[in-house]
Amino acid sequence: MAHHSQLWLLLCVILLCAVTSQSSQPLTIDGEKSAVFLSPSFVLGPGSVENKYYYNIDFPRGHIALKGFDAEVVDELGNPIPLHDTYLHHWAVMRYYGRARTGTTDNESESELHTSNFIEVRNSGICGTTLGQYFGLGSETRHTETHVPGPYRIEVGNPEEIPDGYEERWLLNVHAIDTRGAEDRLGCTECRCDLYNVTVDEYGGPLKEGYTGGLYCCYDQTQCRVRQGFQGVHRRLYLRYTVKWVDWDDSAVIPVRIYIFDVTDSGKRSTNPFKSDANLGCKVEYEVNSCHAPSRDNADCTDSKKTRLAIPRGGDIIYGVAHQHTGGIGSALYGEDGQELCKSIPVYGEGEEAGNEKGYIVGMSTCYPNPGSVRINDGEVLTLESNYTSSQMHTGVMGLFYILVANPLPESTIFALSSVHDHISSSIYVYGLVILGVVMAVAVILGFRRGNGEQGYQTIVM
Ligand SMILES: *[C@@H]1O[C@H](CO)[C@@H](O)[C@H](O)[C@H]1NC(C)=O
Ligand SMILES: *[C@@H]1O[C@H](CO)[C@@H](O)[C@H](O)[C@H]1NC(C)=O
Ligand SMILES: *[C@@H]1O[C@H](CO)[C@@H](O)[C@H](O)[C@H]1NC(C)=O
């Protein structure tokens, strides 16, 4: 009986997804939990940079199913800090197995760094040594929906998968740049090497020839140029993050795989991780040349970068979002047949306050396709496109695309849904199903509201 009602619930949820077509409003499922944590603190003064890795951060434990991860930078009083003060270059959350410890005397980050104590659990993506995170965003973090919709879940903490003697833990990387008093705010956020007076990388090695800006010039403890005489206090800051999850329940959930694609991915992979190679894939960042440069002939001043990449295992896309930096004007993922699978557009702020900072990307639009409506095949070759305005040069920009992919549902459950999507204009029978879906969905929503309270979402609608 219990099983039966769960199936019904699932069906209702799917129908609800079907009838809320084109809306990016995700669902709330009963039993969802949420917890707010603070990262370890970091201190920033005008022009300074923190790029820290925090091992074994506070995180819900046990066999759970993640539903979302949101984050922002706050001060000691919990006030949100605007991007023009502290530019959040990125945060990323990685999953790993750390060797179980006895006692608490260990220096955690030191012991964790020993390779035998640390087993990264990467997402399903294809980048090999980079972009293995489960969640990650940058300046857009305050208004980018991360919610995993409907019955879909990111499964973590399955005890059967954790090696003996290890525990599942989480690693947080926060890269923040204080641009108070900066001579050139955009230049500091784009990590221009001249503004940082940096000529060697973090490990003292030479920069690649022609490298003028990017992560290799704004590493931890570097300093961007500030206006002469500018005074600003040092501030103690935190990444405040909210994790949403539900307890694991085999019967009611559909796991998803996380893929992160990179527009700089040439498909080449290194055989020697210590040898750098300019042609390697997944360089994470790239440069946009100004369309006014003599060598360029680009009338509309759009830099459109594309790459083709094969997805090992396909399925239904149930969520998608791109990551771009200032100057970004949109990104899309296309299937092998050229069909658009998901398009994600930046939202720029227009004011002063945190979450609406003028000139900064404060949100990215997301895709929540009807489950089953956007399907990719195993091994399908996708095209990723990332557009920037090139009216001026940009260094250290990114073109990432994050998608969640689920195995297709069994035909019996998907039938109504695929009918709704494919033949909506040609079948009265389907309209009947849709109406039935609405009725059931309303019933479900009412049930959820009663059980759960209403949950507010900030959905970016372009
Ligand atoms: C722990 O080890 C790290 C890395 O070696 C070091 O930077 C840090 O100062 C150490 N912390 C303590 C409390 O010893
Ligand atoms: C830049 O770096 C060089 C060498 O590291 C140093 O001599 C010089 O004083 C620095 N300039 C500024 C403005 O900090
Ligand atoms: C990117 O720019 C190209 C060329 O201007 C355009 O055809 C394409 O539709 C753009 N894509 C996105 C996702 O905005």
Image (spheres, helix red, strand yellow):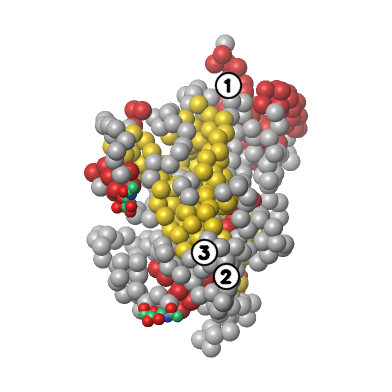
- Kind of residue at disc 3: Gly
Q: Residues within 10 Å of mark 2 (few under 14, many from 20)?
A: few
Q: Is mark 3 on a helix, strand or loop?
A: loop
Q: How crowded is mark 1: few (under 14 residues within 10 Å), some or many (20 or more)?
A: some
Give the position of the C terminus as an image quadrant.
bottom right
Q: Distance between the residues labelled 3 and 1?
A: 55 Å
Q: Position of residue 126 (x, y in %)?
A: 39, 52
Q: Distance between the residues labelled 1 and 2?
A: 62 Å
State the residue position of label 3. 45
Position of residue 273 relative to residue 136, above or below, is below
Q: What residue appears at the point 68 percent right and 64 percent down from the top-left corner?
A: 358
Quadrant position of residue 279: bottom left
Quadrant position of residue 203: bottom left
State the residue position of label 2. 231
Q: Is mark 1 on a helix, strand or loop?
A: helix
Q: Is mark 3 within 8 Å of ligand 2?
A: no
369 sits left or right of 201 in the view: right
- Kind of residue at disc 1: Leu
Q: Can residue 375 be seen in this view?
A: no
Quadrant position of residue 301: bottom right
Give the position of the N terminus as an image quadrant.
top right
Front of the two marks 1 and 2: 2
394 sits left or right of 53 in the view: right
- Kind of residue at disc 2: Gln
Marker disc for residue 7: 1
